[in-house]
Image: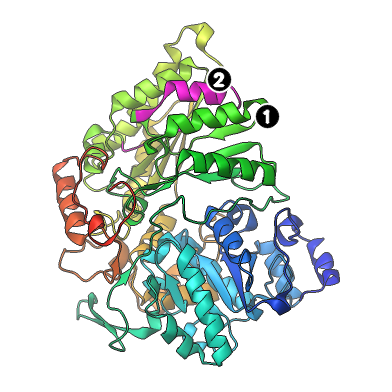
C-alpha cells in the first residue's frame, strides 16, 4: 500500500489531485484479507474521461456486490502525475486502497478507442508488470481486456492474456469463480487459462498460431490444441430487465466528461449504417422496460444527487416507449429541476413536443449527425435521412429558441466526390438561412453553428471493412478544400488530425504483427495518442520502420472478399455474407430498411436469442 504521506507530497505538484485520491461517494472499501479474488478495473485514459464510462460503473458494482470479490479502479495518470510517480518510485496504484496494481489477481482494461493502446502499455510499465504476456510469471496479474475494440483483438495479442468478447456481466463472474477454484487447487497460470478457454466469449491469443501468405495476408489461424475453439462466439445478455444494472454510481469530486446519471435504455441498433461498427456488433436490439428504468432512475438520483439524467443508447429515438419514458421522467423530476438529456436523436424522428418539455427544465445545444453532405452519399452509407429532415429539425429547434447547433460529418467515405464535400458547406449554410428566416422576435440568442468533419476509419465487422482509408494527403486536401469554402463568421469548422485517424485505421484492422510496433512506439515515448498535444507521429513511423511493418498495408489497402481477415474467427451473429451484400448495395447507392420496417436477413437470429428480432 502506498503511504498517505508519500502521496500527499506528490499530489501538491500536480493539477487536479482529486484524480488520484479516491474516497468518493458510493465507492466500496472491503477487507482485502477476506477476499478470494481481486480485480483492478483499468481505464486507459485519465480519470475525467474514465469516470464517465458506464461499463466501469456496471462491472465495479457487480463485482463488489459479490462476497468473495473486490474490484478497485485505476486510471492512466496524466503526464505531470506520471513524472512524479517515476521520480519518486511510486508504482501505479488503485484509488480505493492505494494498492500497487501488480498485487491484484486481474487487471481488466476496457478498449473503447484504438489510440489508447499505448496507455495500456504505460500503465503496465508503471505497475512493473511485463508488457508481453509471454514474459509474465506465476504471481503476476492476469491482464484481460474487453469492450468494442476487442472485436479485433489481434493488435494486442502479444500483450493481453485473454479477451472477453461481448457483454461481460456473466462472463466475468464465471472467470472469477473459476480462478478461485484454480487458486485453491494451486494450479499454474497456463492451467488456469486452460480451465477458462471454453467459457463462451473467452479468447486466449497465446493458444493460437497464425500463418501468413507470401503477400502478407493471413493464411490460417490454428488452435494449438483440438479442444481450443476455432470460433469465438460473442456473449450477449438476452433480457435487459434481468441483467445487472447498478442502483448507485460513484460521484466524482471533480467535473468529468459526463457528470450525470446514466440510464441505459437499450442495447443494439436497428439502423444498419454501413460505417458503424457498434450497430453491427451490438445486435440484436434489447430494451429495458419503462417501469424498470423509472425504478433505476429513482435509485440512482437518490444515491448520487446528480441534477441530470442522460438516456444512453446508440439511437435513442428508436426506443419503442421513448415518449412514455421521457414524459414519466419529466413529471417525476421537474419540481426538483432535474434535467434530461437525449443524445443520439435521429433527425427523422425529432420530436418537437418531447424537446419542448425537456427544454423547460434545462436547455443545451443541439447535435445532429448527417454524416455526409449529399443525399447520394447518405444513401451509400445507409444513413436513412434526407436534407428535408435536417432542415425541418433545425427550423423547429430555432422556433423553440435554440441558437446553438452542432453538425457532425465524415470525410473520406467510400465513393466520396468533391460534390459530396461541397454538400457539407451547403448544409451548414442552409441551417444558417433557417435561423435568419425567422421573424426577429423569434430569434433567441446569437446563432452559432459548428461543423465537425472527422476522418472515416474503416472498422471490423462493418460493410466497409474491406475499403481502403484515404491517405493522409487525400484527407488534408479535402480538409483544406472545406476550410477554403466555409467562410462565415457564424460557422465554426473543425477537423480531425488525419495522422491520428491513419493510425486508428492501422489498429482497427491490424493483425498481431502490429503488437511489436505498438511496444516499440511506447518504448520511445508514444502515449495519450488520442490527445493532440501528446501525439508523436514521427515516433510511430520510426517504430513501423524498425519492425519492418508497412502501416499502409492495414489502412490504405483494399481487401477482397476471399481474404482471411484478422477478426474472422469471431462470431458476432451478423454474417459475412450480409456484410458483403451491404457493401455491394452501397456501391449502387441502395438503401436497406431498418429492422423495425423489415428484416434484412443479417443472420443474428441464427445464433442469438433475445430482443426484438
> Magenta stretch?
349-372
Query: Compared to 549, does 445 lie above or below?
Result: above
Residue 230 locus on image (x, y percent):
27, 78
Residue 101 locus on image (x, y percent):
65, 75
Q: Residue at x 46, y 73 (%)?
A: 518
* Label 1 SS: helix
Residue 336 is labelled as 1
Query: Compared to 381, does 603 lie above or below?
Result: below
Q: Residue at x 26, y 62 (%)?
A: 607
Q: Which residue is mark 2?
A: 446
Q: Could you tell whether 299 is left or right of 456 in the image?
A: right
Query: Compared to 565, does 222 lie above or below?
Result: below
Q: Residues within 10 Å of mark 2 (few under 14, many from 20)?
A: few
Magenta stretch: includes residue 352: yes
Q: Residue furthest right?
A: 5
Residue 603 locus on image (x, y percent):
21, 56
Query: Compared to 203, does 377 lie above or below?
Result: above
Task: Let me know if residue 45 appears in the view.
Answer: no
Amino acid at each position: 500500500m502506498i503511504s498517505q504521506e508519500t502521496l500527499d507530497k506528490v499530489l501538491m505538484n500536480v493539477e487536479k489531485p482529486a484524480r488520484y485520491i479516491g474516497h468518493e461517494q458510493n465507492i466500496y472499501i472491503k477487507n482485502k484479507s477476506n477476499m478470494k479474488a481481486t480485480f483492478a478495473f483499468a481505464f486507459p485514459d485519465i480519470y475525467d474521461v474514465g469516470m464517465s464510462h458506464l461499463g466501469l460503473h456496471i462491472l465495479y458494482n457487480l463485482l463488489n456486490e459479490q462476497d468473495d470479490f473486490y474490484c478497485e479502479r485505476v486510471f492512466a495518470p496524466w503526464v505531470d502525475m506520471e513524472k512524479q510517480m517515476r521520480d519518486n518510485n511510486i508504482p501505479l496504484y488503485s484509488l480505493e486502497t492505494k494498492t500497487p496494481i501488480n498485487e491484484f489477481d486481474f487487471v481488466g482494461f476496457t478498449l473503447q478507442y484504438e489510440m489508447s493502446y499505448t496507455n495500456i502499455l504505460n500503465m503496465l510499465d508503471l505497475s512493473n508488470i511485463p508488457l508481453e504476456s509471454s514474459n509474465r510469471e506465476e504471481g503476476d496479474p492476469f491482464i484481460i481486456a474487453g469492450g468494442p475494440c476487442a472485436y479485433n483483438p489481434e493488435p494486442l495479442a502479444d500483450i493481453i492474456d485473454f479477451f472477453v468478447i461481448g457483454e461481460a456481466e456473466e462472463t466475468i463472474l464465471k472467470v472469477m469463480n473459476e480462478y478461485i477454484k484454480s487458486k485453491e487447487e494451486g494450479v499454474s497460470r497456463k492451467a488456469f487459462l486452460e480451465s477458462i478457454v471454453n467459457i463462451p466469449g473467452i479468447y486466449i491469443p497465446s493458444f493460437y498460431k497464425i500463418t501468413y501468405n507470401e503477400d502478407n495476408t493471413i493464411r490460417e489461424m490454428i488452435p494449438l490444441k483440438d479442444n481450443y475453439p476455432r470460433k469465438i462466439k460473442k456473449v450477449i445478455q438476452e433480457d435487459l430487465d434481468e441483467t445487472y444494472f447498478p442502483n448507485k454510481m460513484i460521484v466524482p469530486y471533480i467535473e468529468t466528461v459526463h457528470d450525470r446519471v446514466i440510464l441505459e435504455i437499450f442495447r443494439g441498433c436497428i439502423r444498419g449504417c454501413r460505417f458503424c461498427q457498434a450497430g453491427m456488433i451490438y445486435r440484436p436490439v434489447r430494451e429495458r422496460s419503462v417501469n424498470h428504468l423509472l425504478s433505476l432512475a429513482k435509485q440512482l438520483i437518490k444515491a448520487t444527487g446528480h441534477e441530470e439524467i442522460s438516456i444512453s443508447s446508440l439511437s435513442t429515438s428508436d426506443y419503442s416507449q421513448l415518449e412514455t419514458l421521457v414524459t414519466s421522467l419529466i413529471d417525476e423530476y421537474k419540481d426538483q429541476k432535474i434535467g434530461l438529456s437525449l443524445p443520439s436523436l435521429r433527425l427523422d424522428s425529432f420530436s418537437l413536443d418531447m424537446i419542448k418539455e425537456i427544454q423547460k427544465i434545462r436547455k443545451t445545444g443541439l447535435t445532429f449527425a448527417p454524416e455526409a453532405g449529399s443525399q447520394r452519399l447518405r444513401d451509400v452509407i445507409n444513413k436513412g435521412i434526407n436534407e428535408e429532415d435536417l432542415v425541418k429539425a433545425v427550423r423547429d429547434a430555432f422556433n423553440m429558441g435554440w441558437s446553438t447547433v452542432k453538425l457532425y460529418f465524415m470525410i473520406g467515405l467510400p465513393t466520396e466526390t468533391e460534390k459530396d464535400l461541397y454538400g457539407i458547406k451547403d448544409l451548414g449554410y442552409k441551417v444558417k438561412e433557417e435561423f435568419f428566416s425567422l421573424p426577429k422576435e423569434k430569434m433567441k440568442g446569437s446563432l452559432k453553428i459548428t461543423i465537425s468533419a472527422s476522418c472515416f476509419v474503416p472498422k471490423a465487422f462493418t460493410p466497409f471493412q474491406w475499403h481502403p482509408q484515404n491517405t493522409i494527403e487525400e484527407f488534408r486536401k479535402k480538409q483544406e478544400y472545406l476550410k477554403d469554402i466555409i467562410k462565415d463568421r457564424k460557422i465554426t469548422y473543425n477537423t480531425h488530425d488525419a495522422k491520428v485517424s491513419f493510425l486508428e485505421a492501422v489498429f482497427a484492422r491490424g493483425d498481431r504483427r502490429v503488437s511489436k510496433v505498438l511496444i516499440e512506439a511506447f518504448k520511445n515515448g508514444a502515449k495519450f495518442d488520442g490527445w493532440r498535444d501528446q501525439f508523436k507521429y514521427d515516433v510511430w513511423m520510426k517504430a513501423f520502420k524498425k519492425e519492418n511493418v508497412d502501416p499502409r498495408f492495414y489502412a490504405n489497402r483494399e481487401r477482397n472478399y476471399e481474404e482471411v481477415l484478422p477478426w474472422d474467427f469471431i462470431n458476432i451473429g451478423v454474417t459475412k455474407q450480409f456484410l458483403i451484400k451491404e457493401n455491394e448495395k452501397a456501391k449502387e447507392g441502395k438503401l436497406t430498411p431498418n429492422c423495425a420496417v423489415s428484416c434484412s436477413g443479417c443472420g443474428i437470429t441464427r445464433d442469438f436469442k433475445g430482443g426484438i428480432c
